[in-house]
Image (cartoon, rainbow, N blue to C red):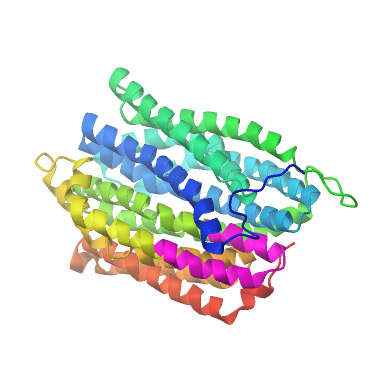
Amino acid sequence: MQNNKKKYDMLKDSAGKSLFFFALPMILGNLFQQFYNMADSVIVGRFVGEDALAAVGASYSLTTVFIMIAIGGGIGASVITSQYLGAREYGRMKTSVYTALISFAAVSVLLGMFGFAMCGPILNALHTPQNILADAVLYLRIYFVGLPFLFMYNILSSVFNALGNSKTPLYLLIFSSLLNVGLDFVMVLAFGMGVAGVAVATVTAQGLSAVISFFLLVHTLRGFRPEAGQEENAYYNWTMLWGMVKIAIPSMLQQSIVSIGMLLVQSVVNGFGSSVLAGYTSGIRIESICIVPMIATGNAVSTFTAQNLGAGNPERVKKGYAAAYGIVFGFGALIFLVLSAFHGQIISAFIEEGSGAMAYATGDAYLFFMRFFFVFIGMKAVTDGVLRGAGDVGVFTLANLVNLGIRVFVSFRFAGIWGVEAVWYAVPMGWIANYLISFLWFLTGRWSRKKVV
């Protein structure tokens, strides 16, 4: 095998530094990804109109569910791959990668067909305002045509992270983000394509990145050669697939919990009209940026846990978990300070205060409230990361279901009493409950006796 030692080795170097410097490219990459997602909203909100912004927002929750399914599938593959890497079983490691790519490629085609056929009925079931329904359906149908590329891009990124290489996904995300924003301007301003233009831009940019990522991964895997006495890799293994599925299904559920909650809760927001929906869309786009460092740190903890358990070192996992708290508390404090000082100016990037007063007020109120609570999703993410990396997925799946249940129940039950504010009051309630359940299970130590390869 080629020498792939990084500056900070997850198996040997300082737990805090190795986690931080592994998470940092993922944070930057995900920020770029959120940047071009946000660019879609900014461009249509500023240059097309409030209804176009609401249409993209109505589509956002549904598209995120599918991408989170891809991310959850990638986590299932990455846990198996990371543990084989930690055990230096390179032939089996490559087999796990090929098995994941083939399986999830097939799944992505089926999901794309389902989404294309069902996006209209789903949006109707969510009570999407009629004045934006046609644009929302158009956006989604273009999106689902390109879903296999978008899906596989996220799977490929997860595999690179499992191999301890979080820089390649970062470079590809930077490329994809800049291309996406450039295409947004061309499609919307030059060609006047409106909502359809930003959908075409997203599919084109991520599709090209997926193709490049695939060829880079194939080249990377050639450098890992089985050691003497180890079996050569095969291209598919049903037993490995089952091992991935056992982790992937709860991980898909966990990764999509927030998105499913947003989708269900959006039907509550839709009932307040397109102006409130436009403001809410702005708020959750900023929220999606704020949670990036928290989720990335949790994913880094997952890889850290899998590699160290594969190497037979559960005590090092505990050190990494403690260090991760320092990372998420630092990010939480920074987010609080930025939102306290600039919440109004941030919302103004989407909506002018004078021209969309209701939308502006909704988005501003959402950010001002949420600034206190982002540290809780960080604590939840790193705790879930340990359990997920260990393959101990039962309790953390339950914890995430409780999270979803609280968000949906509070939103539906109290929106008629508290107004649309009930939607964001429910968010930290769900995060805190999720964290407490996962943390209590972490304290039992049973996760440290799990090993999936």
Q: Residue 390, how many percent across, how many down?
A: 63, 66
From the top left corner, tell me how far across and down residue 210 is, in percent: 56, 34
**Is any atom of residue 408 visible in this view?**
no
Residue 427 lies in quadrant:
bottom left
Q: Can residue 421 be seen in this view?
A: yes
As displayed, is residue 214 above or below residue 331? above
- Count of all numbered marks drawn on residues in the image: 0
Q: Based on the displayed image, in which of its 4 quarters is residue 56 positioned?
A: top left
Q: Which residue lies furthest to the bottom in this view?
A: 444
- Of residues 423 and 350, the one nearer the viewer is 350
Q: Report whether 261 appears left or right of 388.
A: left
Extent of the magenta region:
300-328
Give the residue at the far right of this rendering.
Answer: 229
Image: 181 above or below 5: above
Closest to the observer: 250 or 80?
80
Q: Quadrant of the C terminus?
A: bottom right
State which quarter of the image contains the N terminus: top right
Q: Nearer the viewer, residue 223 or 14?
A: 14
Whether 398 is drawn above or below 68: the answer is below
Q: Where is residue 197 in the image (x, y as percent from the top left)?
A: 36, 27
| Magenta-drawn stretch contains 32 | no
> Is 291 or 271 nearer to us in this picture?
291
Residue at the spot x=19%, y=41% of the render? 351
Secondary structure mainly formed by the magenta segment: helix
Task: Identify the residue at the far top of this view.
Answer: 190
Residue at 56% across / 70% down in the picture? 319
Report which quarter residue 48 is drawn in: top left
* Residue 43 point in image, percent of width and height: 28, 32
Residue 325 lies within the magenta run: yes
The residue shown at (25%, 48%) is 277
- At 47% from the left and 50% from the top, the residue drawn is 24
